[in-house]
């Protein structure tokens, strides 16, 4: 099992304590020193106030935040979890991702999804009804930009008629693409276009709001992993599909607290059904508190699983 930890870049109310360049660098170095395999950030460029009042959050731009993390570290991987592809022109996304991959020495994991927040789509000038089609289109367009010269690609709202991008990513043919989402469509997208699938625990009551299928138990997750494997066999896919999940206690739906023996058992159960990566997040009011959480997790979980 490998572990990715969320940098607290969504806690904008903490100001310089958690959101300064010094803070991002310090906490990234701490995660690396504690033995985490990756660090990740989320994104919400322009969320609606109503969603914020219901418990939503802001965040730093993911590429900027991870650039600070990259400059401060040497080994730890840098993950977007997740980047909403339909928000941007795919060639601009490809350029940002390639730039970060080059400058970090090939450490980017590009976690992406179709998104769900209607008010944010509209504010950014994107029709949310097109989100799935735009996401699939973006994946094809980015791969073309990373691997081909003289790209000719007609999208729904753009057209390339002989364009090329340099530099290409440090990782060849491109950074790993992990597809987020719980639905069967998201799983198909991961199998057809991605290198990994990144579902997240979601209670049934939140399914309509998050616009994805609920996952409330290991059994539900196992069923969807089995479906992904069926699709891989049907497509004669030989390369492995990484599975990245989050323990419910260490997500937005949890309290951020965990019982170490119970969590170690849960990790063993998740590994048994095919999960190879876990994304975890901790509450943090200060850098010192966040470092303490990293060190506790390393001591009680990382060194023992």
Image (spheres, rainbow, N blue to C red):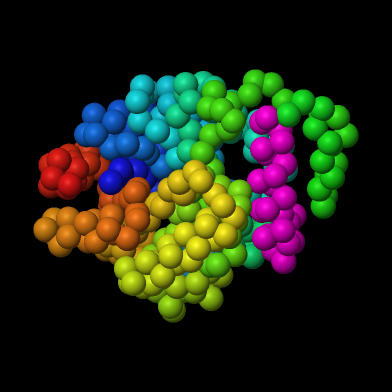
Number of numbered labels in the structure image? 0
Residue 84 visible to an observer of this rendering: no
Instruction: Give x and y (percent) for residue 17.
Output: 33, 38
Quarter-of-image position of residue 289: top left
Left/right of residue 152 with respect to residue 276 in the rendered view: right
Specify the farthest residue to the bottom: 205
Residue at (63, 24) in percent of width and height: 168
Q: Main secondary structure of the magenta part?
A: helix
Determine if the magenta segment contains residue 201.
no
Percent coordinates x, y for residue 267 in the rendering: 24, 56
**Magenta part of the protein: which range?**
122-147
Q: Is residue 103 left or right of residue 8?
A: right
Q: Position of residue 99 (x, y in %)?
A: 59, 26
- Seen from the viewer's position, the closer of residues 139 and 16 is 139
The residue positioned farthest toward the right in the image shown: 161
- In the picture, residue 169 is in which quadrant? top right
The reply to whether residue 38 is in sight is: yes
Residue at 53 percent of width and 34 percent of height: 175
Q: Is residue 124 magenta?
A: yes
Residue at the spot x=34%, y=72% of the render? Answer: 219
Q: Is residue 87 above or below residue 117?
A: above
User: Could you say where residue 221 lies in the image, as x and y percent from the top left?
Assistant: 39, 67
Depicted 31 relative to depicted 86: above or below: above
Front residue of this view, candidates 303 and 192: 192
- Indicate left or right for 12 with 193 as reference: left
Left or right placement of residue 132 versus residue 242 in this view: right
């Amino acid at each position: 099992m490998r572990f990715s930890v969320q940098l607290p870049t969504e806690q904008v109310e903490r100001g310089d304590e958690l959101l300064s360049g010094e803070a991002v660098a310090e906490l990234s170095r701490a995660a690396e020193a504690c033995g985490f395999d990756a660090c990740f950030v989320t994104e919400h460029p322009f969320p609606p106030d109503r969603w914020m009042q219901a418990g939503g959050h802001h965040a730093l731009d993911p590429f900027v935040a991870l650039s600070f993390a990259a400059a401060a570290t040497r080994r730890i991987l840098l993950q977007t979890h997740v980047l909403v592809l339909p928000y941007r022109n795919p060639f601009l996304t490809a350029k940002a991702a390639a730039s970060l991959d080059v400058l970090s020495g090939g450490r980017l994991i590009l976690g992406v999804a179709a998104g769900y927040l209607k008010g944010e789509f509209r504010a950014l000038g994107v029709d949310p009804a097109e989100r799935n089609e735009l996401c699939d289109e973006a994946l094809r367009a980015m791969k073309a930009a990373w691997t081909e010269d003289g790209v000719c690609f007609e999208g729904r709202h753009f057209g390339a008629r002989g364009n090329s991008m340099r530099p290409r990513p440090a990782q060849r043919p491109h950074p790993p693409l992990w597809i987020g989402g719980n639905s069967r469509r998201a799983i198909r997208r991961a199998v057809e276009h991605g290198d990994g699938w990144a579902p997240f625990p979601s209670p049934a009551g939140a399914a309509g709001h998050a616009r994805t299928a609920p996952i409330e138990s290991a059994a539900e997750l196992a069923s969807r992993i089995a479906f992904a494997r069926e699709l891989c066999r049907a497509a004669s896919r030989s390369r492995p599909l990484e599975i990245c999940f989050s323990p419910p206690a260490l997500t937005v739906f949890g309290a951020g607290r965990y019982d170490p023996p119970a969590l170690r058992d849960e990790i063993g159960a998740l590994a048994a059904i095919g999960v190879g990566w876990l994304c975890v997040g901790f509450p943090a009011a200060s850098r010192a508190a966040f470092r303490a959480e990293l060190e506790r997790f390393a001591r009680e979980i990382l060194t023992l699983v």
